[in-house]
Amino acid sequence: MYELTWGLPVISYFFLAGLGAGAVTVSGSVLLRKGGFGASRFTIARYGALIGPLPVMLGTFLIVFELGQPFRALNLFHLINLSPMSIGSWFLNVFIILSVLYAMTFIPPSAAPGDRLAPFRRALAWICVPLGIGVAIYTAVMLGAMPARPFWNSPILAALFVVSALSSGIASIILVSVFFMRRSKDPNVKADYHNSCYMLVSSDALLIGTELMIIFLFILFGNLTIGDTRYALRTIMPGGELASMFWGLVVIIGLVIPFFVEVVQIAPKLLYDRKFKSHVYLEVLIPVAILIGGFALRYIIVVAGQITAPTTL
């Protein structure tokens, strides 16, 4: 048995902050993208913007109250220093404020690509995209700043968290689209939905492929080192304490299965320019699998870093 200092509230914060930051980043990126899909881009941007701030605020609430004395968190804003915790706290607060303002530009029923809020919306999107990436990176930097924990002390972790956050953000947007757009009987809404779904699924397949490559590099470089890092990596390798969860939930359920399903879905349109088709069950189950894998990834990384420590000083 291991005594964990960081439990589910902190793990949930890492997951929720990444999901929210990913949703806003995807929203802003799609909104700023020129050409293609017309109204579909705006619909994706709207859902991502409205989803994003909520999980980030919930995650921040969890980690602040995990301190036991939540008001002491205000000490981080008394002065600015270069510690990861201080910089990340400022990043987080600025992101929450601006992402809420960004979401508010999509709330009016009359919101549309060329409405009077469009310039303000685009300006906020330009700011929220790098901020969202910064929030996703911060969750990894916060761990990597602890050299005494070799499992966390890897620059590859930041790339892994960013790509996973973007994939989780896309998964959340797909889920919302299924419940609010697929049921519509309006042919224009249905066409908009299929275009949106194709754009999201094809982007997510690319992200998942990248995430699998990053995990491969994380394991490869860990095994090429000697001493503490290689020892710490044993927790997720076959026979390790977290191996079953890592390979089962993260790799197979959260990455490999969604990747192959999404490739099969997009292949007819990508290769032969046929109409994009997808079964409603897959549109729900695959995003849920991705979200489960994203949470399990952060659970494993946070726990693995705590149950392993340097073998030498």
Image: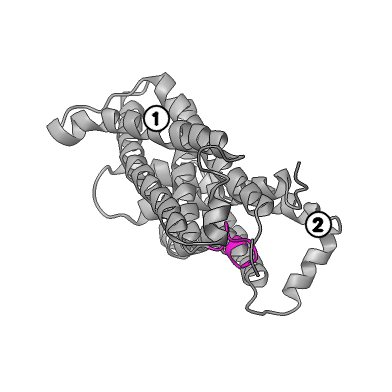
In this picture, residue 66 sits left or right of residue 105: right
Residue 22 in view here: yes
Q: How far across and how far down the image is residue 190, in percent?
A: 34, 26
Highlighted magenta segment, given as a residue range: 143-153
For label 2, the residue is 67
For badge 1, the amino acid type reads Ile
For label 1, the residue is 257
For badge 2, the amino acid type reads Leu
Residue 54 in view here: no
Nearer-the-camera pick, 186 or 56: 56
Give the residue drawn at x 49%, y 26%. Answer: 179
Quadrant for residue 34, please give it: bottom left
Vertical placement of residue 232 versus 37, above or below = below
In this picture, residue 275 sits left or right of residue 4: left
Rate crowding at label 2 as few (under 14), some (14 to 19) or many (20 or more) other CA atoms within 10 Å: few
In this picture, residue 106 sits left or right of residue 8: left
Give the residue drawn at x 47%, y 65%. Answer: 127
In space, the residues marked 2 and 1 are separated at their CA atoms by 37 Å
Q: Choose the circle earlier in sequence order: 2 or 1.
A: 2
> Is 150 contained in the magenta span?
yes
> Is 229 contained in the magenta span?
no
Q: How far across and how far down the image is residue 132, in percent?
A: 50, 58
Under circle 1, the secondary element is: helix
Give the residue drawn at x 51%, y 42%. Answer: 237
From the viewer's perspective, is the residue at label 2 or at label 1 nearer?
1
In this picture, residue 262 sits left or right of residue 10: left
